Amino acid sequence: MSEAGSLAAAPVARLIDEFHKLPGVGPKTAQRLAYFILRTSADEAHALAQAIIDVKDQITFCSSCQNMTDVDPCSICRSEKRDRTVICVVEEPLDILALERTRFYRGLYHVLHGVISPMDGIGPDDLKVRELIHRLRDGSVREVIMATNPNVEGDATAMYLDRLITPLNVRVTRLARGLAMGADLEYADEVTLTRAIEGRQLV
Amino acid sequence: MPGRAPRIYRTEAVVLKQRRLGEADRIITLYTPQLGKIDAVAKGIRRQTSRKAGHLEQLTLTSLLLAHGQNLDLITQSETVESFLPVREDLQRLASGLYVAELVDRFTELRSENYAVFRLLVETMQRLAVSDTRELAVRYFELHLLSHLGYRPQLRQCVVCRNALEPVANSFSAALGGVVCPECRHANIGLWRLSVPALKVLRLLDRNTFEDAERLRPSTELMTEIETLLRGYVRHLLEKNPRSLDFVEAVRHAGAREPRRTATQTADDDVASVVAPPAGAASQ
C-alpha cells in the first residue's frame, strides 16, 4: 500500500492502490482519479464498475482468429462478406483496428498476441502459432499475409512463420515497406530506401 | 556555465536492444567504442514519421549525436553506417546476430569502455553478413569476447598442475577456466571431454585472426564439440543460458534461405527452396 493511500480511509486507500496498478498511473494521478470517483454520482460510479466487470466476463478470445470478441467466433470470422482464402497475421488486436480502418482488406485475420523476441526469451511457443498452423490444415486458405511490424523482431517472426507455412503449399506474403506518408527522403534509412526502390510503382 | 562538459557528443554505436518507454519513445541499449555500453532515450521513435527509427534498428552500426540528460542521455540524431542487411534477411544469420548482441549485453556493464569488444562486435556482424562460415564466426566471437573480458580459457597448460598439455584427450573445466590434464582429472568434477583436434581448433581460434582460422574447415562433429564446450563455459559464467539460444536452436534445422523474393513468384518455387538441402548446413 502506498504512503498516500495509507493516510486515507481504508476503502479510498484501496481504490487508490487499484488505480496505481494501471499503466502510466503514478501515485498522484491515482489519488486524483480516486477523489474524482468519490465526487461523481453513484450511478456513474456503478456504470464504470459494471463496464469493467462486463469486459472481463464477456470478452474472450475468438477460437479461430484469437482476436478479442464478445461472440465466438468473432464478427469478422463469421461474416459472409469476408474472403476466407486469405489470412492476415498481426501481432496485436489493435493492429486489426488499424487495418480495418483502411476498408481495403476483406480477408480474415490471425492475432499472434506478441512477436518472437529472442533476447527476451519469447519464442514461437509463447505465441498463437500452433492455432495459425491448425487453421491452414484444411487447405482452404491460399495466402497468408504477414503484417508484423517492420523491425528486427517482426522480420524474425515473419521469416520463421514463412518456414513453417510455405511447406503447407500456402503462399506467404509480407506487407510492402517503403517511405511512410509524411516521411522525408533525406532521413530515410538504407533498408527502407532499398525496399522502396525495389517496390517502385508506375506513377 | 564555465568548465562544464559540452552538452552534446558524437559517437558510433551498435544497437544491442530496444525497449519501450511511454507512448512513443524507446530506450536504446548501445555499444560504443569509447563509452562501452550505454542506455539512451530515443524520443518519438515509434511515430511513423520518426527520422531516427530506421537508423536505430537492432544490430545496426549507427552514427549518433547524443545530448547529456539528467538520467539517461538523449539521442538527437542518428544515421546508419552499416545496416548488415544480409543478417536481417536470413533467419539463421539473424538468430546468430541476436545471440551475439545478447552476449555483449549480458557480459558488459554500463559505461565500462572496452574498444576490443566493440571491434569484435562489428567484425562479427560483418562476418555474419558475408561469411559462409557463420558457425565458426560465432565460435570465434564467443572465445574472443570472453578473452577481452578476462575469461580467456587456459589452453596451453593444465590449470591444476601447470604442466604443458600432452597431445592426448584432455578435459575442460568451466569452473577452473581451462584445460585439465588426464593426471589431474580424478581430483575434479564437472569436466567435459576435450579431444585433441578440438583443443587444436580452440588454440587456432584463440591465437589467430579470423581470416586465418576461417581457412580451416572443421568437421561437423568437431564444430559440435567446440560449440557445446564454449556454450557450457558461457553458461557457467552467466549462471544461465542466454535467452536467444532457444531461437538459435529453433531455426537451426530450417536450412538456409534463398534471397528475398517478390510476392508475384509462385508458391511452388518456394516449396522447392525449402525442401532442397540447406546450403550452409555446417552445423550438426
Image (spheres, coloured by chain):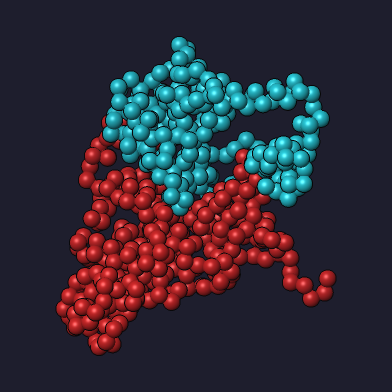
Chain colours: A cyan, B red
The residue at 41%/58% (across/down) is B242
Quadrant into which the C terminus of chain B falls? bottom left
Which residue appears farthest toward the top when viewing the image? A80
Q: Is residue B27 left or right of residue B58?
A: right
The residue at 44%/25% (across/down) is A65
Image coordinates of residue A196 in percent, x first then y, are 52, 40
Kindly tell me whether residue A194 is visible in this rendering. no
Q: Is residue A50 above or below residue B240?
A: above
Q: Nearer the viewer, residue A135 or B271?
A: A135
Q: Nearer the viewer, residue B194 or B189?
A: B189
Image coordinates of residue B215 in percent, x first then y, are 26, 68
The residue at 69%/61% (across/down) is B71
Q: How many marks?
A: 0
Quadrant into which the N terminus of chain B falls? bottom right
Q: Is residue A178 left or right of residue B157?
A: right
Which residue appears farthest toward the right when viewing the image? B1
Image coordinates of residue A168 in percent, x first then y, are 29, 30
The residue at 50%/45% (across/down) is A151
Kindly tell me whether residue A87 is visible in this rendering. yes
Image coordinates of residue B24 in percent, x first then y, are 64, 44
Q: Is residue A72 above or below residue B15?
A: above
Q: Is residue B74 above or below residue B116?
A: above
Which residue appears farthest toward the front when viewing the image? A10
Residue B200 falls in image quadrant: bottom left
